[in-house]
């Protein structure tokens, strides 16, 4: 069985501090501890990798034949966890650009260069032209360059053409500056990144390094000696699925635009990483994420429903229905005379066309050009929604992507536009494909969508969904999740899911707690990408897009527990493992091995992982511990693996208790001083008086080291705060001090303890 393991990441000599942060040059940061790495004296090259005695094998056994490893990276904030994974991103970026066969990415500076060329041509066109541009032409320029008008720019401007000239000029200045920044950043990465990845697959160990502007790949023989692999092109490499919802991570405004190359790509899973959520200028849109999550869940649930009679979530919910509600942010379109029993309910939001105008609508022409001239000749359920939605999306594509449809002279080319709408298979036209597929199938009067229905709402059971998918494609059981998305989610519907609890109570997924939703979204994001990676192994289409059938996958989860209650953290690994069981069937080709790596602050996650698979960092340094973590006590894990050197108590509670102790000590010492003074006043023995006076001096010295307590810390407040303390030994120690200071309360305290014991006896 193929076992893939991401063994370690190494910052090599020459790696700039910008990339490695506080990580140590030449240190092998291991996610598995059953091997050793030797570097040359210069710490620039791995010269030997030796295997050591292995620990337990197949701990995380999957019945579908996929081998699974789980590791964790722990440490205080600032210990170097994120820096280590960012090194992985840098390496994947350089590998994708500088491999010997074909770049998988385009450098951001080249994308900016294309924008500059276009802006220069538009600027020249505006400045050289003697004719007055029409408003629609000026707005086209704005759309082509994704420009917005601000109130400041509009102030005092009466000539629209002058305004656009000024905006284009500023845009060009910005782009030229951005290009220089990008070139500088890309040059810095090429000259100052020096790092290596070591991984194992199919019984062999490999390393990929980037140093001195050069990418190198080695395979290590049975003696641990390296042999160079020429013409490296990801054949033995792995794909990384990465989740990181931290708002302050992976910000292109901090890291540079190179990271955008990893976010913004549509390459059919060729570049070996996907990072969720997708960010624009460091920000991710939570509503966009919600929409994408629902789409992924829809395709995953449909995929599961095709293969299983029941679809379960988090091992406590069961999927019952798919809920569809029509979107309402567009005008419905209908041919006058079509019969619709819900016409009255929709009249105010419907635009009616006569036959000639209807036939000339872009939406109608597109549908008929793809499906045939016989379509849309009579009304079918939701047809008016579908056409209204199509008309809106077509106009949006025309405006937002207008530069794609221009001829050499930057004039709109209608034929090019229509050809794009018909033939494009990217995310740009996904909603069009979904809606046209819906119209194709629902045109049949016997379609499940033409049963009695609510005019803007519908729901499908799992059985009904299978009937719908069978209408869409007779071979629907062999479709991938991404292919199912073209059928399962008509573009003009919002989607939700009805699920049942263990006591058969019905709830909507959208009404679950935010933590439960996030758990479902995260697991389904992982599953969605795995399903699609699996599908590449079955893709034999002739395409210009490079298809790389990755057999090995690293799943990197950066503080994924951020939304979860401790009990959900405790169940996380099991929930992911159960999801991985569904990725493929036993004996199927495809994904063979997965390595999950957590970056975590959760002891509950650590208790599912053996100590040999845990990398502990403290300010960039590796901390070795002999303690076993698998199934370990949570308090021990907190103390040893999370470096809680100051204990487990909240800092505010600790400070407040210390202030109570100081206040009681202040009062105790003053009481003791008063007692000594009384004894001095009563004694006539000179020697005894001298001893007592010396004792008072010592007490006063102690008092001088204690700040006079605030009036807040009086007898009542101290007693009430002590009663809040939950740790029994600390509570008893504090009460002992309290009753020593306020001796009149000692009997009261003893009686309260007797009463408490009496109550316990009766239980």
Image (cartoon, rainbow, N blue to C red):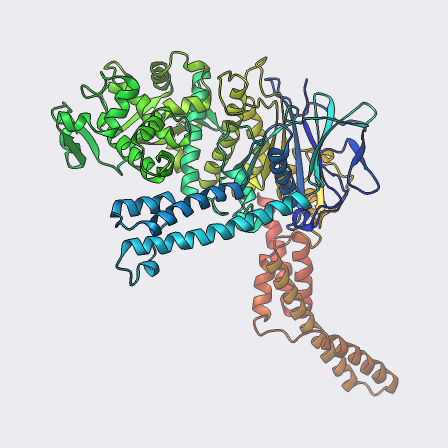
Which of the 4 image quadrants contains residue 359?
A: top left
Q: Image height check: is 177 above or below 705?
A: above
Q: Nearer the viewer, residue 367 or 554?
A: 367
Residue 754: x %, y % from top left: 63, 54
Residue 689: x %, y % from top left: 83, 84
Which of the 4 image quadrants contains residue 30?
A: top right
| Number of numbered discs visible in the structure rendering | 0
Q: Can I make out residue 742 in this image?
A: no
Q: Which residue is at a point 30% across and 47% down the rendered structure image?
A: 138
Which of the 4 image quadrants contains residue 191?
A: top right
- Quarter occupied by the C terminus: top right
Q: Can I make out residue 706 in this image?
A: yes
Q: Which residue is at a point 35% across and 21% down the rendered structure image?
A: 461
Residue 503: x %, y % from top left: 42, 28
Residue 179: x %, y % from top left: 52, 48
Image-based side of 68 in relation to 36, left or right:
left
Q: Nearer the viewer, residue 315 or 205?
A: 205
Image-based side of 210 in relation to 421, left or right:
right
- Quarter occupied by the N terminus: top right
Q: In the displayed orientation, state which residue is furthest to the right.
A: 687
Q: Image height check: is 734 above or below 406?
A: below
Q: Nearer the viewer, residue 301 or 213?
A: 213
Image-based side of 136 in relation to 142, left or right:
left
Q: Image height check: is 541 above or below 557?
A: above
Q: Nearer the viewer, residue 181 or 623?
A: 181
């Amino acid at each position: 069985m193929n076992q893939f393991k991401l063994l370690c990441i190494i910052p090599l000599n020459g790696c700039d501090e910008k990339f490695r942060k506080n990580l140590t040059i030449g240190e092998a940061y291991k996610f598995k501890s059953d091997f050793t790495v030797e570097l040359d004296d210069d710490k620039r090259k791995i010269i030997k990798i030796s295997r050591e005695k292995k620990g337990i094998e197949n701990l995380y056994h999957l019945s579908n034949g996929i081998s699974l490893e789980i590791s964790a990276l722990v440490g205080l904030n600032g210990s170097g966890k994120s820096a280590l994974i960012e090194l992985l991103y840098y390496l994947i970026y350089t590998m994708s650009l500088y491999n010997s066969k074909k770049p998988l990415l385009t450098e951001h500076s080249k994308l900016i260069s294309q924008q500059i060329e276009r802006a220069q041509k538009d600027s020249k066109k505006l400045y050289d032209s003697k004719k007055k541009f029409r408003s629609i032409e000026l707005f086209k320029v704005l759309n082509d360059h994704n420009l917005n008008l601000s109130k400041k720019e509009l102030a005092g401007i009466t000539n629209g053409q002058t305004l656009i000239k000024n905006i284009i000029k500023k845009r060009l200045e910005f782009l030229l500056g951005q290009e220089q920044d990008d070139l500088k950043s890309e040059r810095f990465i090429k000259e100052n990144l020096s790092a290596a990845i070591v991984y194992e697959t199919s019984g062999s160990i490999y390393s990929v390094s980037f140093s001195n502007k050069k990418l190198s790949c080695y395979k290590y023989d049975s003696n641990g000696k390296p042999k160079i692999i020429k013409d490296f092109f990801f054949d033995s490499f792995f794909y990384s699925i990465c989740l990181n919802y931290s708002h302050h991570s992976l910000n292109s405004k901090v890291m540079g635009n190179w990271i955008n190359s990893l976010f913004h790509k549509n390459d059919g899973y060729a570049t070996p990483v996907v990072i969720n959520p997708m960010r624009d200028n460091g920000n991710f849109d939570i509503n966009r994420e919600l929409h994408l999550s629902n789409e992924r869940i829809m395709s995953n649930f449909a995929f599961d429903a095709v293969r299983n009679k029941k679809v379960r979530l988090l091992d406590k919910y069961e999927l019952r229905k798919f809920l569809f509600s029509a979107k309402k942010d567009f005008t419905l379109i209908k041919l006058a005379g079509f019969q619709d029993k819900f016409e009255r309910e929709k009249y105010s939001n419907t635009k009616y066309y006569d036959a000639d105008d209807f036939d000339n609508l872009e939406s109608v022409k597109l549908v008929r050009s793809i499906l045939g001239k016989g379509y849309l000749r009579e009304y079918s359920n939701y047809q008016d929604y579908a056409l209204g939605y199509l008309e809106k999306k077509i106009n949006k594509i025309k405006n937002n992507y207008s530069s794609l449809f221009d001829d050499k002279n930057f004039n709109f080319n209608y034929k090019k536009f229509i050809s794009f709408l018909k033939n494009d298979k990217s995310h740009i036209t996904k909603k069009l494909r979904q809606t046209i597929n819906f119209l194709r199938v629902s045109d049949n009067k016997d379609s499940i969508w033409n049963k009695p229905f609510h005019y803007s709402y519908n729901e499908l059971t799992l059985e009904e969904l299978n009937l719908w998918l069978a209408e869409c494609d007779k071979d629907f059981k062999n479709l991938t999740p991404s292919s199912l998305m073209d059928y399962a989610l008509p573009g003009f519907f919002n989607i939700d899911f009805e699920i049942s609890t263990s006591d058969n109570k019905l709830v909507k997924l959208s009404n679950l707690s935010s933590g439960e939703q996030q758990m479902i979204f995260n697991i389904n994001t992982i599953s969605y990408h795995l399903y699609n990676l699996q599908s590449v192994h079955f893709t034999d289409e002739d395409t210009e897009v490079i298809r790389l059938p990755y057999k090995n996958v690293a799943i990197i989860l950066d503080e994924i527990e951020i939304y979860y209650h401790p009990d959900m953290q405790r169940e996380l690994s099991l929930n992911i493992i159960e999801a991985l069981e569904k990725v493929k069937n036993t004996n199927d080709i495809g994904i063979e091995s997965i390595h999950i790596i957590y970056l975590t602050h959760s002891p509950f996650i650590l208790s599912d992982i053996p100590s040999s698979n845990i990398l502990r960092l403290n300010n960039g340094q590796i901390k070795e511990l002999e303690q076993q973590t698998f199934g370990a006590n949570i308090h021990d894990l907190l103390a040893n693996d999370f470096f809680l050197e100051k204990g487990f108590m909240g800092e505010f509670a600790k400070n407040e208790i210390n202030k109570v102790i100081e206040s009681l000590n202040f009062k105790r010492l003053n009481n003791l001083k008063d007692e000594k003074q009384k004894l001095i006043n009563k004694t006539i023995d000179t020697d005894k008086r001298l001893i007592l006076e010396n004792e008072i001096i010592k007490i006063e010295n102690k008092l001088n080291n204690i700040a006079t307590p605030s009036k807040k810390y009086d007898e009542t407040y101290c007693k009430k705060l002590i009663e809040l303390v939950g740790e029994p030994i600390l509570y008893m120690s504090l009460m002992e001090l309290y009753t020593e200071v306020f001796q009149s309360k000692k009997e009261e305290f003893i009686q309260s303890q007797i009463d408490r014991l009496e109550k316990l006896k009766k239980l």
